Amino acid sequence: MYTGTGQEVRSFSQLRNEFADVDTFYLATGTALIAGSPIRRSRSRPSVVAAAPVLPTEDVQKVPLRGARPRSKSRPRILYAPESEILRTNGEYTMLDIMKEDPTKVTIRGLRRTFYPPAHHAPADNTPPDKKLQLQWVHGYRGIDARRNLWVLPSGELLYYVAAVAILLDRDEDAQRHYIGHTEDIMCMDIHPSRELVASGQKAGRDRKSQAHVRIWSTESLQTLYVFGMGELDMGVTAVAFSQLNGGSYILAVDSGRESILSVWQWQWGHLLGKVATLQEGLSGAAFHPLDDNLIITHGRGHLAFWHRRKDGFFERTDIVKQPSRSHVTSVQFEPDGDVITADSDGFITIYSVDSDGAYFVRTEFEAHTKGIGCLIMLGEGTLLSGGEKDRKIAAWDSLQNYKKIADTKLPESAGGVRTIYPQRPGRNDGNIYVGTTRNNILEGSLQRRFTQVVFGHGRQLWGLAAHPEDELFATAGHDKHIALWRKSKLIWTIQTGYECVSLAFHPFGTALAAGSTEGHLLVINCENGAVMLTLRVCGSPINCVAYNQVGDMIAMGSQNGSIYLFRVSRDGFSYKKVNKIRGSQPLTHLDWSMDGNFVQTVTIDFDLLFWDAKSLSPERSPIAMKDVKWLSSNCTVGYLVAGMWSNRYYSNSNTIITTCSRSASQDMLISGDADGYIRLFRYPCMSPRAEFHEAKVYSGMVACARFLYGDHTIVTVGGTDASLMVWDLIEE
């Protein structure tokens, strides 16, 4: 007697202890075995197994356990393999085919899953691929939750950061350079007074290699010069700043832990000069006073304090006469004589002076913006610029005339509010500035002329990604209700829709783009100009995955409610007619069509691999019966030919969760992304946990999607919650 997976039952105690949950068993007489099931190899009886004949259907009888519950029609039939699907009398499966390889078992979130090998597939090669990943371009800007993160270098390059990458953008050459020394998201950055060095601090990761620390590196060579704070900084680095008076010999760092520890370092020697627990929740920034390297100002939520560092390393705190009543001090600047200027989340600008006793008091205060102020910057000749996060205004104030307003301008609504401002030519007072916005864009302009877009980024979470079938184009869609079409480093067009979109697919002819929304809509877009051609209400749940079959006459959509929706598509890809839906119960995350268009495979949120019959409109195919089906793509993250991505022996974390994968068009490479932010390039097929790979780590959160572009020379990845979009070149190893 055998189970449906080919395990032999040798005793009643084994039946009771090991197979208590199995509903169906098979009997074979004499030396006969079940031909349609993968048989476990037995060293004690190799000749019997090898000589086992293939029995006709009528010689095998299905014997249910006594008292077994009859199968419910509502339960997935994938768990029950009908005899007509398991037994093959026409020689489709032979015993030698079945004995070639054992099923692969993978543990995912504590559960063992079994995947069956196809009769014919490319041999496994566990060596790393001949090509490796090289970061080529980063789209977007981190303005959604970061301040003071945009500078201009002496070379004219823009300096900013996204995820764990510092970007140096040369607009004249249309090129980027990248500093990728960090292993987790960059949380803060500052530029040395010489403008040739940069200090950047990162958040803490999950392993010892990803501790919170500060790196000092050269903008010319992109080489790391110093690293400090390993073991000293806990959760991450909230703020980092160079001293000014002594030429940047000191640097401060603020830990984002519960005590918000402020530490000062002489970074050339790696010496810790002193530290103090500020005990301030919501501390968001710190700076050295430009006229005193031993005076530090910290600010944050309802907090503004002055810290004097003594020669023995201890700090003395000096509070201002009147603590700020505003909810959050967002920015600090200084007048030429040393008076302190602050901006807050209520839209007020406050100037603090010091009296003869060394106490700070409010000299003047005025309302500059509606609600929050994102940043302040003092230009030459005493002009102060302020940017509003809510009202999207940029205003200029004359500090020599008691902060009389000189001029103001307003950014377009699509750009978002002001997050940071930096002059295009530092040291000049020509009024030309760069502006980083709350919607992850960078603009250029002045108060006298219009602002134009320099860098476009999705303003909220980014999940949708699709590669064009006939060109090196790709499309993205996110929660900011924007859909964009790109060619590597170039933005071709972007449109704003009425829905948050999370899934994308190109029609096989490349003329149409299908997008699935969080509200259950299907949007069909003309790829030539970005015009929305059709909007259909498919269901009331998010459409998490969408794909066309090979000829493009059918589209399948996997929903959060667990069902597959099938629509017939016109030849041009712009007309759709509903065929039917196949009911399911678990939310679906990934989807692939078979080459012949008869079947669909999906992955559930619990990483179960399910199969669907697109002809009979039922989820009735067993895993064994589907093992030899050829699939048009390999976007499903579980399966026999991609099992080597899971529980890989070379991973630093054995509990890694694979969130996305994709196969190259030549079917020789596999790209994967996981919940820890790793991108890994394998050979395809990838069946063994001993499979080696090339990897890159530029994200802290999960990698939402990764795809090969047409030609297999380029890979695109999106970062989900951080809205980052990165383009990678595949170069020879």
Image (cartoon, rainbow, N blue to C red):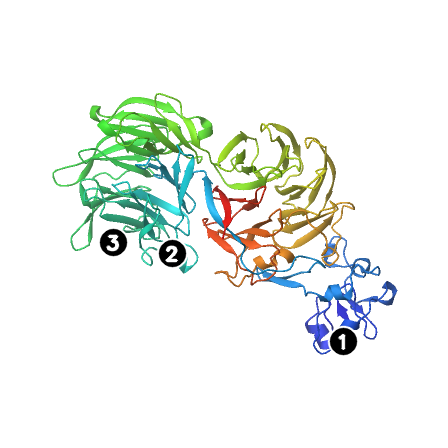
Helix, strand or loop under label 2? loop
On residue 131, which mark appears?
Answer: none
Q: Residues within 10 Å of mark 3 (few under 14, many from 20)?
A: some
Q: Which of the two residues, 579 or 161, is positioned nearer the viewer here?
A: 161
- Occupied quadrant, residue 9: bottom right
Residue 585 visible to an observer of this rendering:
no
Circle nearer the viewer, 1 or 2: 1
> Label 1 belongs to which residue?
47
Q: Residues within 10 Å of mark 2 (few under 14, many from 20)?
A: many
In this rendering, is residue 403 above or below 28?
above
Helix, strand or loop under label 1? helix
Q: Amino acid at mark 3?
A: Lys
In this rendering, is residue 490 above or below 72?
above
- Marked residue nearer the N-terminal end (1 or 2): 1
Helix, strand or loop under label 3? strand
Outermost residue on the bottom side: it is: 44
> Label 3 belongs to which residue?
275
Along the horizontal axis of the image, is 112 left or right of 242?
A: right
> Which residue corresponds to the image point at 49% horizontal and 49% vertical from the top-left?
133
Circle nearer the viewer, 3 or 1: 1
> Label 2 belongs to which residue?
211
Q: Amino acid at mark 1?
A: Ser
Q: Position of residue 599 (x, y in %)?
A: 73, 48
Outermost residue on the front side: it is: 732
Cβ–Cβ below 8 Å for labels 1 and 2?
A: no
Distance in Å between CA atoms under marks 3 and 1 = 75 Å
Residue 236 visible to an observer of this rendering:
yes
Q: Amino acid at mark 2?
A: Gln
- Marked residue nearer the N-terminal end (3 or 1): 1
Along the horizontal axis of the image, is 235 left or right of 45?
A: left
- Occupied quadrant, residue 88: bottom right
